[in-house]
Image (spheres, rainbow, N blue to C red):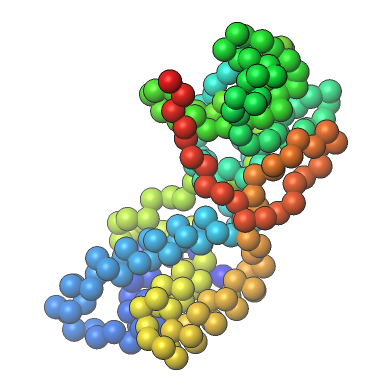
């Protein structure tokens, strides 16, 4: 299925799909709306589904006693699907969420250390959002992030899409068209998704799996960075 199609070409394809006027003046006035619709549709599809060809693995070296790490380049917070830690030659799932319950058990503020890391969270430490680990590791370790790579810029006419252009166009057309035409466009978009064999994006693991099993795939929540003062 077509990926790597330019935004400029997709605007023309969307215009044709919706049978919009090819009048130059009217076409120019519609251009910002059509571009924005395509940009937003691609991002919503990226957030909602697990695109196999966009999966990435990022390893982070975490030193003993280290509490915070930067998110690796090439992946956004919304793209994080699974977080694991290397321990005793195994990869263990980490729970998302660090609050007073965890800190009461092993207080990072007091530099208490314990292996393995069991939980992670997103926190604004001042300069930017960072990953927080709990408990603080007693020895150097490696954390692995699995998820979807960041979307490439999709602003200029020469920028290209990351996701199948036909899927993007048909979902965008379903929003722009009316009644029966919109239903047909949506049905086509859903059939294209089926052919692409994409699943809903998995959620972050909510349970620490001692055996390192992969968590169930569910709709995931957007990561929110909290400010700890």
* Residue 190, x across and y down, in percent: 57, 76
Residue 60 visible, this orientation? no
Residue at (23, 73) in percent of width and height: 30
- Left or right, 216 with respect to 24, comes to right
Q: Quadrant of residue 129?
A: top left
In the rendered view of the protein, which quadrant contains the C terminus?
top left
Q: The N terminus appears in which quarter of the rendering? A: bottom right
> Total number of numbered labels?
0
The location of residue 20, given as percent across then percent down, is: 29, 84
Which residue appears at 84% of the width and 23% of the height?
Answer: 88
Please give the name of the residue rendered at 35% of the width and 78% of the height, measured from the top-left corner.
176
Tell me which residue sits at (53%, 76%) in the image.
189
Residue nearer the viewer, 12 or 228 = 228
Q: Residue furthest bottom?
A: 180
Viewer-proximal residue among 27 and 219: 219
Relative depth, front residue between 213 and 9: 213
Q: Residue furthest left?
A: 25
Say left or right for 27 vs 100. left
Give the quadrant of residue 198: bottom right
**Vertical order, 69 against 176 (above or below):** above
Which of the 4 image quarters holds residue 84?
top right
Q: Position of residue 73 (x, y in %)?
A: 50, 34
Q: Is residue 178 above or below residue 110?
A: below
Measured as percent of width and height from the top left, residue 134 is found at: 65, 23
Q: In this orientation, does residue 57 appear?
A: yes
């Amino acid at each position: 299925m077509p990926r790597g199609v330019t935004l400029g070409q997709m605007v023309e394809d969307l215009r044709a799909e919706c049978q919009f006027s090819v009048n130059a003046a009217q076409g120019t006035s519609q251009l910002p709306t059509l571009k924005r619709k395509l940009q937003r549709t691609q991002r919503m599809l990226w957030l909602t589904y697990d695109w196999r060809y966009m999966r990435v693995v990022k390893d982070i070296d975490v030193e003993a006693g280290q509490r915070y790490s930067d998110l690796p380049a090439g992946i956004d917070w919304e793209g994080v699907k699974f977080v694991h830690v290397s321990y005793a030659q195994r990869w263990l799932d980490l729970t998302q969420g660090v609050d007073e319950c965890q800190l009461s058990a092993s207080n990072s503020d007091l530099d208490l250390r314990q292996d393995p890391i069991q939980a992670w969270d997103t926190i604004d430490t001042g300069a930017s959002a960072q990953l927080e680990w709990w408990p603080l590791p007693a020895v150097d370790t490696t954390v692995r992030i699995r998820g979807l790579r960041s979307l490439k810029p999709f602003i200029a006419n020469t920028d290209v899409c990351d996701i199948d252009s036909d899927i993007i166009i048909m979902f965008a057309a379903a929003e722009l068209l009316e009644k029966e035409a919109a239903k047909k466009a949506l049905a086509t978009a859903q059939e294209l998704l089926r052919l692409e064999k994409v699943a809903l994006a998995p959620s972050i693991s909510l349970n620490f799996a001692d055996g390192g099993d992969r968590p169930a795939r569910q709709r995931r929540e957007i990561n929110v960075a909290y400010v700890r003062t």
